[in-house]
Image (cartoon, coloured by chain):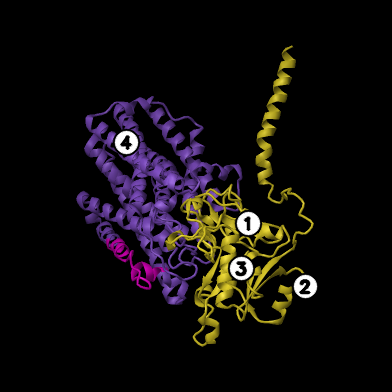
Chain colours: A yellow, B purple
């Protein structure tokens, strides 16, 4: 009787230990691939997503439309106070986007107008390296994503990003005044992308939610051809061809992050 | 031994109640931040860490500095530190705990704190910082408590505590090294991207930590009659002097590299801190005050004649603490964000709620420190040591 009880307790102990160890062992298995749902039939799939921004086609209207399309697609709240801003894609001066890469004798057309900056979806993302909870992570296709439900809001990724591409919800974004359309009516939040809660970091996700439905990123769609998006691993893709045919630059290439947003000069 | 904290003079209770009041005020203000968001602080998209993370950085140093007593006492058998080593260990406990509270109040989603351990991420320095800080706190509370208890019973400390003491020595260096790595490994933040960040942190820590400890010891002597002994004070003052010289030396090395190389990114933050950048000079008076205090400290510490004069020593220590606090508890973290990654200049001014929360967290640290020191001093006086 006694021995049975002992062995029963042993089994119980081992099972309990196993249940405790298993989840943490999973977490340590860095190489393990997450098991997700299979992509939809019409989903856009790639191996190395990249964006190419043609500075010659980037007009004022294109910039405004692209930013507006992104803000609407992702329910990005608008803050009057510069300190609280949430920005995924936005206008920035040439010298600000490319510090250290300018000289005093560049063509005026190149440096006069603002250009668009966004998350570079780096091949070696420092933000992913510093995140203590894997709330920000890199997908196999190169997209650097956020898990808003795991983020603890430590903002280490904001210190780590060399491009200033990350925003923090200092306030509850759901309590911000809703977007107003051209007729002055309130636009309800887009049901295609979740609103966030306060206290988490967010940034551009290359419209992963749209790619999954076979659509191009919202900014690309609104850009009238100034923004190209595609798979750089595919030699025949539009982006690969564009980069072969014209000279392009990237932001802070010396940091070894391998940005995947290219600017055609 | 905990009962020792429950018997004290009216002054002791007055101090405890005052701290509890500050804690209450801080907690109430924290609730405001918790329910409204970190928008109630002065932090911004550009300067995403402020006074909370600065205090974390400063206090990790204070915690690590306990080793400046532990090392001479246990490794070199320097008997003069016998009475105050326990103070170093207990100060480390209170300081680490305060550090971790500063991380907690800085989080956007504090309820998810345990995600750090539920999803352990070895490539994140913050994960390692959480690990080394917790272990260091545990080491010091176990060592300090066990040794004190043995002394009280007039028996030698148990054998198993020795290896823990030896581990705690390199561990003290590790906590501040890992904390320096939080900053020193970020591409694009030139002000932080320096290999001497860790040695610089350690030098300022080994100056400021023991200076704070000595100042507290002077207060304890006045209030309780507990005397660390002249020799111990002198030895600690000497350690503080050398550490402060190293600290200032490292700072000058940074200045040399930035300005002789003439690389704009390396110069920007220094210019912002000491002269102002693009019309923003909020921190300039503070940074010069920091230099002034550091200079006063060195002038009063280096000549033995001044250092041995206790009145001057107190002035020196107070200046040193002020100087290093402004440098590390304000300029270092905030400065790293200016200019931002797109070379815009945004300034950071902590808000009133943010400052009240900071005071509240410090009050918790002082409360724990008071309880621990009360126990230590009572036991020491009981055994007549």
Q: Between residues B382 and B178, which one lies in front from this camera angle?
A: B178
Indicate the chain on which mark 4 is placed: B
Q: Which mark is residue A235?
A: 2
Q: Main secondary structure of the magenta part?
A: helix
Residue at image point 60% right, 72% down: A253
> Is there a contact, CB below 8 Å, between mark 3 and mark 4?
no
Locate residue A154, reporting x and y percent.
Answer: 50, 51
Q: CA distance from mark 3 to mark 4?
A: 50 Å
Instruction: Point out the frontmost of discs 2 and 3.
Output: 2
Considering only order in the chain, which callout, 3 or 1, is on the residue closer to the N terminus?
1
Judge left or right: residue B152 versus residue B195.
Answer: left
- Per the image, label 1 sits on a secondary structure element best described as strand
Instruction: Point out the frontmost of discs 1 and 4.
Output: 1
Q: CA distance from mark 1 to mark 4?
A: 43 Å
Instruction: Point out the frontmost of discs 4 and 2.
Output: 2
Q: Residues within 10 Å of mark 1 (few under 14, many from 20)?
A: many
Locate residue B162, reporting x and y percent.
Answer: 49, 36
- Per the image, label 2 sits on a secondary structure element best described as loop
- Per the image, label 4 sits on a secondary structure element best described as helix
Magenta-highlighted residues: B269-292
In the rendered view of the protein, which quadrant contains the N terminus of chain B? top left
Judge left or right: residue B50 versus residue A258.
Answer: left
Q: Which residue is mark 3?
A: A256
Q: Which residue is mark 4?
A: B20
- Per the image, label 3 sits on a secondary structure element best described as loop
């Amino acid at each position: 009787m006694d021995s049975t009880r002992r062995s029963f307790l042993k089994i119980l102990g081992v099972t309990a230990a196993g249940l405790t160890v298993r989840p943490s062992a999973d977490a340590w298995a860095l190489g393990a691939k997450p098991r997700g749902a299979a992509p939809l039939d019409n989903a856009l799939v790639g191996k190395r997503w990249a964006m190419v921004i043609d500075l010659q086609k980037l007009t004022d209207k294109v910039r405004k439309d692209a930013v507006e399309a992104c803000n609407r697609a992702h329910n990005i709240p608008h803050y009057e106070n510069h300190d609280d801003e949430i920005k995924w894609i936005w206008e920035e001066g040439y010298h600000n986007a490319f510090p250290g890469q300018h000289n005093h004798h560049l063509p005026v057309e190149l440096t006069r107008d603002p250009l668009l900056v966004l998350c570079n979806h780096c091949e070696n993302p420092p933000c992913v390296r510093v995140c203590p909870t894997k709330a920000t992570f890199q997908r196999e296709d190169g997209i650097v994503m956020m898990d808003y439900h795991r983020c603890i809001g430590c903002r280490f990724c904001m210190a780590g990003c060399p491009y200033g591409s990350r925003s923090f919800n200092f306030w509850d974004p759901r309590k911000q005044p809703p977007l107003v359309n051209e007729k002055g009516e309130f636009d309800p939040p887009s049901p295609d992308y979740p609103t966030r809660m306060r206290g988490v970091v967010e940034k551009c996700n290359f419209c992963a939610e749209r790619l999954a439905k076979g659509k191009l990123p919202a900014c690309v769609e609104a850009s009238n051809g100034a923004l190209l998006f595609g798979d750089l691993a595919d030699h025949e893709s539009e982006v690969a061809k564009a980069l072969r045919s014209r000279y392009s630059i990237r932001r802070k290439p010396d940091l070894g992050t391998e940005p995947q947003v290219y600017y055609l000069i | 031994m905990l009962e020792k904290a429950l018997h004290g003079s009216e002054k002791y209770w007055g101090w405890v109640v005052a701290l509890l009041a500050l804690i209450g005020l801080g907690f109430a203000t924290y609730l405001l931040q918790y329910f409204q968001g970190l928008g109630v602080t002065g932090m911004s998209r550009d300067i995403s860490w402020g006074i909370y993370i600065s205090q974390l950085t400063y206090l990790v140093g204070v915690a690590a500095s306990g080793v400046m007593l532990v090392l001479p006492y246990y490794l070199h058998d320097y008997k003069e530190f016998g009475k105050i080593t326990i103070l170093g260990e207990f100060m480390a406990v209170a300081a680490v705990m305060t550090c971790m509270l500063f991380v907690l109040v800085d989080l956007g989603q504090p309820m998810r704190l345990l995600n750090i351990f539920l999803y352990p991420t070895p490539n994140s320095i913050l994960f390692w910082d959480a690990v080394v800080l917790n272990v260091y706190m545990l080491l010091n509370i176990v060592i300090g408590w066990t040794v004190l208890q043995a002394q009280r019973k007039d028996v030698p400390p148990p054998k198993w505590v020795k290896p823990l003491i030896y581990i705690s020595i390199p561990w003290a260096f590790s906590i501040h090294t890992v904390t320096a790595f939080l900053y020193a490994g970020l591409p694009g933040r030139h002000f932080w991207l320096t290999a001497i960040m860790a040695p610089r942190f350690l030098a300022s820590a080994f100056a400021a930590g023991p200076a704070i400890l000595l100042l507290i010891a002077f207060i304890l002597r006045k209030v309780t009659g507990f005397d660390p002994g002249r020799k111990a004070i002198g030895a600690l003052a000497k350690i503080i002097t050398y550490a402060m010289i190293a600290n200032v030396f490292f700072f000058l090395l940074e200045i040399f590299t930035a300005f002789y190389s003439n690389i704009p990114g390396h110069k920007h933050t220094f210019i912002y801190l000491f002269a102002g950048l693009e019309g923003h000079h909020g921190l300039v008076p503070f940074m010069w005050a920091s230099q002034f205090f550091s200079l006063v400290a060195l002038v009063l510490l280096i000549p033995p004649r001044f250092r041995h004069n206790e009145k001057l020593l107190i002035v020196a220590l107070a200046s040193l603490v002020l100087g290093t606090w402004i440098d590390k508890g304000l300029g270092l973290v905030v400065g790293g964000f200016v200019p931002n990654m797109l070379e815009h200049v945004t300034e950071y001014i902590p808000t009133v709620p943010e400052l009240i929360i900071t005071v509240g967290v410090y009050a918790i640290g002082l409360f724990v420190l008071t309880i621990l020191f009360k126990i230590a001093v009572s036991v020491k006086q009981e055994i007549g040591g």
